[in-house]
């Protein structure tokens, strides 16, 4: 009972605060775009980092409480926990890209994904915030490897989607004879889109491989064409097509931006749509 009380007052309440922190960060990044004020940009990054640290603390607290309750598992085992980790992954991938490329305008188009992911935990159907024991299928060491690789890959694809939206907005403006000067150059956006996919694709590949190994452990078969497995493969093929078209046919710009957005739509359906609309072996997630 004491652990449950701690759960109610610490990890979920921290997440409730982080939701508003990420909303504030999103607003700050949008305000930074037209003014390009360095102080405002640093504030946006600082707020984002504070939110990520708080989210990290929430996940650590939840793990500790799980061990105190006698179940002892990482916080990746239900829809609520996975949404929190998805948000966490988006932010860490974004912060690394911002640090590497010294470009803060991307935050306005990526941080909304982190905010929406957390906000969904308060309004989404089937969300359970309670810490629960693992169902038998989840009692495997493959759990952590599979979830971490998949969601870091999903996060990289969220960044590529945000960058692709920026690309299409700027390209559309230029077609009309206008230039949105506060957005990065189209070549920069195209390169960022490509590099985000290059980060995400091998992680998704590892996620599918570890998932197959986990499926064999849990159900005695590496692949059963479960709806989530099938849609994971569809998503993999979309991003494989992205890389293939870029390498062999020289696709650049608008074509790859559109393909990136389609790919992330497939990611969201694989992650949420399958769980909510189609029953299968992964329905517990």
Image (cartoon, rainbow, N blue to C red):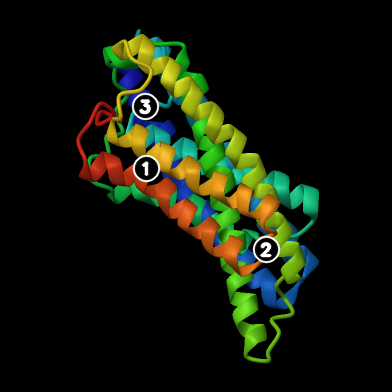
Please state, as top left, top right, bottom left or bottom right, where the C terminus lies in the image: top left
Instruction: Give residue 201's quadrant in the image.
Output: top right
Q: Which residue is identified by label 3?
A: 7
Q: Earlier in the sequence, mark 2 or mark 3?
A: 3
Image-based side of 46 in relation to 6, left or right: right
In this orientation, does residue 67 appear?
yes
Please state, as top left, top right, bottom left or bottom right, where the N terminus lies in the image: top left
For the point 73% across and 52% down, the residue is 98
Picture disc at residue 282: none
Picture disc at residue 270: 1
Q: Is residue 106 above or below residue 208?
A: below
User: Outermost residue toward the front?
Assistant: 248
In this orientation, does residue 20 appear?
no
Secondary element at image label 3? helix
Residue 228 position within the rendered picture, expressed as x and y whole percent measured from the top left:
33, 35
Q: Is residue 43 above or below residue 16?
A: below
Picture disc at residue 252: 2
Image-based side of 111 in relation to 215, left or right: right
For the point 29% across and 13% down, the residue is 219
> Which label sits in the foreground, 1 or 3?
1
179 or 24, which is in the foreground? Answer: 179
């Amino acid at each position: 009972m004491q652990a449950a009380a701690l759960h109610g007052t610490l990890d979920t309440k921290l997440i409730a605060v982080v939701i508003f922190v990420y909303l504030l960060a999103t607003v700050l990044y949008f305000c930074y775009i037209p003014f390009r004020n360095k102080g405002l940009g640093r504030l946006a990054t600082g707020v984002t980092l504070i939110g990520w640290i708080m989210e990290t603390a929430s996940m650590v607290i939840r793990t500790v409480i799980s061990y105190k309750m006698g179940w002892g598992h990482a916080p990746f085992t239900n829809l609520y926990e996975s949404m929190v980790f998805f948000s966490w992954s988006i932010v860490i991938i974004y912060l690394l890209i911002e640090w590497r490329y010294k470009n803060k305008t991307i935050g306005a188009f990526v941080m909304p994904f982190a905010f929406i992911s957390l906000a969904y935990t308060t309004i989404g159907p089937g969300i359970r915030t309670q810490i629960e024991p693992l169902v038998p299928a989840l009692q495997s060491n493959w759990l952590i490897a599979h979830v971490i690789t998949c969601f870091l890959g999903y996060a990289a694809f969220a960044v590529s989607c945000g960058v692709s939206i920026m690309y299409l907005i700027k390209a559309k403006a230029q077609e009309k004879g206008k230039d949105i000067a506060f957005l990065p150059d189209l070549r920069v956006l195209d390169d960022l889109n490509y590099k985000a996919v290059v980060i995400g694709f091998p992680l998704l590949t590892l996620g599918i491989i570890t998932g197959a190994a986990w499926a064999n452990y849990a159900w005695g078969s590496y692949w059963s064409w479960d709806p989530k497995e099938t849609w994971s493969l569809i998503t993999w093929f979309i991003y494989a097509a992205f890389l293939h078209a870029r390498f062999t046919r020289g696709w650049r710009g608008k074509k790859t931006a559109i393909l990136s957005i389609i790919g992330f739509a497939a990611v969201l359906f694989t992650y949420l749509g399958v769980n909510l609309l189609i029953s299968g072996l992964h329905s517990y997630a």
